[in-house]
Image (cartoon, coloured by chain):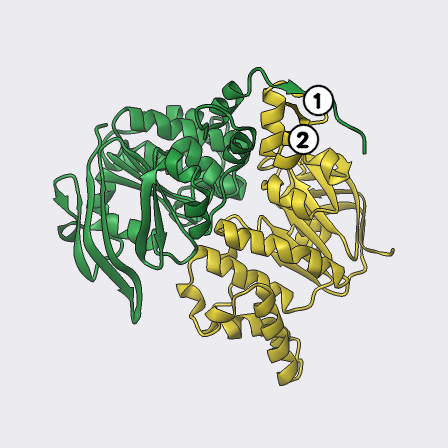
Amino acid sequence: MTALVALERVGFTYPGAARAALSDVSLELAAGEVLVVTGETGAGASTLLLVATGFAPRVVGGRLTGGRHIAARRCGVVFARPWTQLTGLCSTVQDEIAFGPASYGLPRQAVLDAAARAMRELRVEHLAGREPSQLSGGELQRVVVAAALALDPEVLALDDPAAELDPEAADALYDVLPAIAASGKAVVVATPDLERAARVATRAVKVEGGRIATSGAPAAVLEGTEPSLLARAAGCPPPWPLDVPALVGRVRR
Amino acid sequence: MTGCNVRVTAVRFAYGEREALRGIDLAIGAGERVALVGPNGAGKTTLTRLLVALRRPTAGRVTVGDWDVATRRPDEMARRVGYVFQHADQQLFARTVADDVAFGPRCLGRGRAGVAAVLDELGLGDAGDLHPYDVPAPARKLVALAGVLAMEPAVLILDEPTAGLDRVQRSRVVAALGRRAEAGVTVLAVSHDLGFVAEAADRIVAMREGRIAADLDARELLYDRAALGGLGLRPPAVVEVSDALGLAGRPVRFAEAVEAMRGITWREQISE
């Protein structure tokens, strides 16, 4: 499979920062995969998303070192704070979601179709006529993801996309990610929500202090799920079970 | 710091034509730790904004202690009720984290007393000299929380305080709220994170479509799968594990579950 994004020993430093936010990061992103990036707050997961999608340094400034090749024709990023991403120009959710495809100069019907498809996928059709600034935090987060998806990006990067969603909406959002990946896109998600991440990840990376600490199969990387921590604290020998059924399976009756 | 009762009586609120709150009655006692849960758009944030006079109800009455909120301005309310916004970036403005946290106590004439202790309590001890926007986005919520705690309000309202926080940060928030509640401070936290709710609250008020759909003891609701399902909620992992293993005492908190799991015999991993 050809890589949509390839990073080769990449480093990145934000403008004015004394220390590098990323160091010596090598990573490939391929169509069809859901890559989960995890790490403690400040470890560099969000920065990795920005670098992998080309937003850093192009939009945020700063200095990039090492080799980066982005073959994807379009990358979409959804930031952790969704309100920063609204155009401020649209008075309805439908217009907001259609803004991206419209700005690419697509024919009117193609724009409407793209918006309708994205709204359907994120289950926000019922919000189509609402004013974006009047949405609740969780509604807004789904609308912003739909707006990114409407651009039909080959790489879709999501920074903690369910942070403000209620559990049903969060599950629903994570549930659509495998289908998005299967349609030929690479999906990369930075999140501390290891339970949901473990459900959808095809691969996982853990960052610590701006470096990739571990990478590989989700079960090997996402070891900090609540069931695994419970099992560990209660004396279960490793490897610790990632989810509840696995934990129950390890108990000798 | 002593707490205050919060009382909401027959409150309604509309954004233009759209009714967001359709008759809310709620009484919270001093020192209670209450979580407000419910789907996006249920009216949770709107309700909390009425408690600090950022919005005025279209009908009904809100009181905090002996204050009728209708007669108070938001800046007066801030002396009694500390509020951490869902998007805490909106409430940070100083040039350094320490200055931001000190703003509230300085306005109250207390100088910078307590600022360093609150920063340490939330694990921000090394961040005091940083610009708030040089702190990772989720941790800015902790900066806003520190600013509110430094004012020593009688009531604490937090809107999604743990969104994006890692496990260590989340446990610091739980501990900080627990200490305040023990001192009599009334705590009301809006949250989708039922793991956090289980650790930090004793009572859960669930909202749906602008109404209160349930108001229950936290342990009772967290073990009531049908009621949770009806609210679009799933039990947190600790409760799922405890339920599946039939642990004694219905644990809802991590430490309780670990305690109840003592004596379990574990199998080695069976290779697939």
Identify which residue is drawn at 53% across, 42% down: B164
In the foreground, A77 or A222: A222
Q: Which amino acid does label 1 sit on?
A: Arg
Percent x, y for residue B169? Answer: 50, 32
Quarter holding the C terminus of chain B?
Answer: top right
Q: Give the residue at the far bottom of this rendering.
A: A108
Chain containing mark 2: A
Name the element at disc 1: loop
Q: Which residue bears the numbered disc 2?
A: A249
Percent x, y for residue B102? Answer: 34, 34
Identify which residue is drawn at 50% across, 34% down: B239
Chain containing mark 1: B
Q: Give the residue at the far front of this rendering.
A: A253
Is B226 displayed left or right of A76 in the figure? left
Q: Which amino acid does label 2 sit on?
A: Gly
Picture quarter containing residue B29? top left
Name the element at disc 2: helix
Chain A drawn colour: yellow
Percent x, y for residue B22? Answer: 26, 60
Q: Is residue B17 above or below residue B114?
A: below
Is B217 displayed left or right of A103 in the figure? left
In the foreground, B121 or A67: B121
Is A193 displayed left or right of B53 in the figure? right
User: Are the residues at dot 1 and dot 2 in contact (C-beta closer than 8 Å)?
Assistant: yes
In the foreground, B67 or A195: A195
In the rendering, which numbered label is found on residue B267?
1
Whole-angstrom CA distance, mark 1 to mark 2, is: 8 Å
In the foreground, B234 or B177: B234
